[in-house]
Image: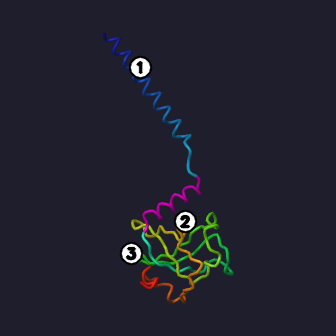
C-alpha cells in the first residue's frame, strides 16, 4: 500500500512538472504586442474611458520651421488643476487628420485618463479632437489657459 502511494505521488509530481514546463514554454513564446499595437491599445483605452477638455496646438519645440504634416502633434491642456504639454505620434493616423488642423494656436479637444491625466490623446482610430473647420486660434499667452469644451462651442 505504501508503494502504491509513492507511485501515485510520483505521478502527480511528474504531471505538475510537465504543466510547469508547458507553462514556461508558452510564457517564453507567447505573442508579444509590438510597440505600434501597444500605442494603439493605449489610445483606444484613453478614448473609451477618458475625459474631455480643451487644449491648444503648439509649435514643435525642436523644429526649425512649422510642418504642415508632422508625425508628432504637440499640444497643451489643463486637467485636474495642472497644465500639461504633450506630444502624440500620429504617423499611423494620417488618414484621420484633416491637413489644415495642424496650425499652432488652433483649439482642439483633448481626451485624458482621469487616473493619470498626463496620458492623453487628440486623435485615435475612433475619435478626433482635431477639426478642419475650427478657425478659433489663441495667442501664445492665452494658450496656457484652455477653456472648457462647452465654452468653446458657445454653450
Residue 51 in the image: state x and y as whole percent: 42, 70
Query: Magenta residues, as a range?
Result: 34-50
Above or below, comparing residue 87 to residue 133 in the picture: above
Numbered mark located on residue 11 in the image: 1
| SS label for mark 1 | helix
Q: Residue at x 60, y 80 (%)?
A: 59
Numbered mark located on residue 80 in the image: 3
Numbered mark located on residue 31 in the image: none
The Cα–Cα distance between marks 1 and 3, rounded to whole angstroms, is 59 Å
Residue 116 in the image: state x and y as whole percent: 42, 66
**Classed neighbour count for the residue bearing mark 2: other residues with Cα under 10 Å, few (<14), some (14–19), many (≥20):** many
Above or below, comparing residue 154 to residue 34 in the picture: below
Residue 77 in the image: state x and y as whole percent: 48, 78
> Along the line of sight, which residue is nearer the eye, 61 or 150?
150
Q: Tell me, yes or no, whether the two marked residues, 1 and 2, touch with CB atoms within 8 Å.
A: no
The Cα–Cα distance between marks 1 and 2, rounded to whole angstroms, is 53 Å
Q: Residue at x 49, y 31 (%)?
A: 21
Q: Nearer the viewer, mark 1 or mark 3?
A: 3
> Along the line of sight, which residue is nearer the eye, 107 or 154?
154
Residue, disc 2: 124
| SS label for mark 3 | loop
**Classed neighbour count for the residue bearing mark 1: other residues with Cα under 10 Å, few (<14), some (14–19), many (≥20):** few
Q: Quadrant of residue 38?
A: bottom right
Q: Tell me, yes or no, whether the two marked residues, 1 and 3, touch with CB atoms within 8 Å.
A: no
Q: Tell me, yes or no, whether the two marked residues, 2 and 3, touch with CB atoms within 8 Å.
A: no
| SS label for mark 2 | loop
Reading the chain from its start, which is encountered first: label 2 or label 3?
Answer: 3
Residue 25 in the image: state x and y as whole percent: 53, 35
Amino acid at each position: 500500500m505504501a508503494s502504491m502511494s509513492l507511485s501515485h505521488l510520483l505521478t502527480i509530481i511528474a504531471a505538475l512538472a510537465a504543466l510547469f514546463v508547458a507553462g514556461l514554454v508558452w510564457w517564453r513564446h507567447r505573442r508579444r504586442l509590438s510597440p505600434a499595437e501597444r500605442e494603439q491599445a493605449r489610445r483606444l483605452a484613453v478614448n473609451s474611458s477618458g475625459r474631455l477638455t480643451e487644449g491648444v496646438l503648439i509649435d514643435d519645440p525642436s523644429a526649425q520651421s512649422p510642418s504642415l504634416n508632422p508625425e508628432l502633434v504637440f499640444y497643451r491642456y489643463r486637467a485636474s488643476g495642472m497644465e500639461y504639454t504633450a506630444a502624440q505620434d500620429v504617423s499611423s493616423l494620417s488618414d484621420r487628420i484633416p491637413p489644415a488642423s495642424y496650425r499652432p494656436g488652433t483649439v482642439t479637444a483633448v481626451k485624458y485618463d482621469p487616473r493619470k491625466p498626463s496620458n492623453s490623446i487628440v486623435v485615435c482610430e475612433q475619435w478626433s479632437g482635431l477639426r478642419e473647420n475650427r478657425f478659433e486660434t489663441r495667442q501664445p499667452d492665452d494658450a496656457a489657459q484652455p477653456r472648457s469644451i462647452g465654452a468653446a462651442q458657445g454653450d
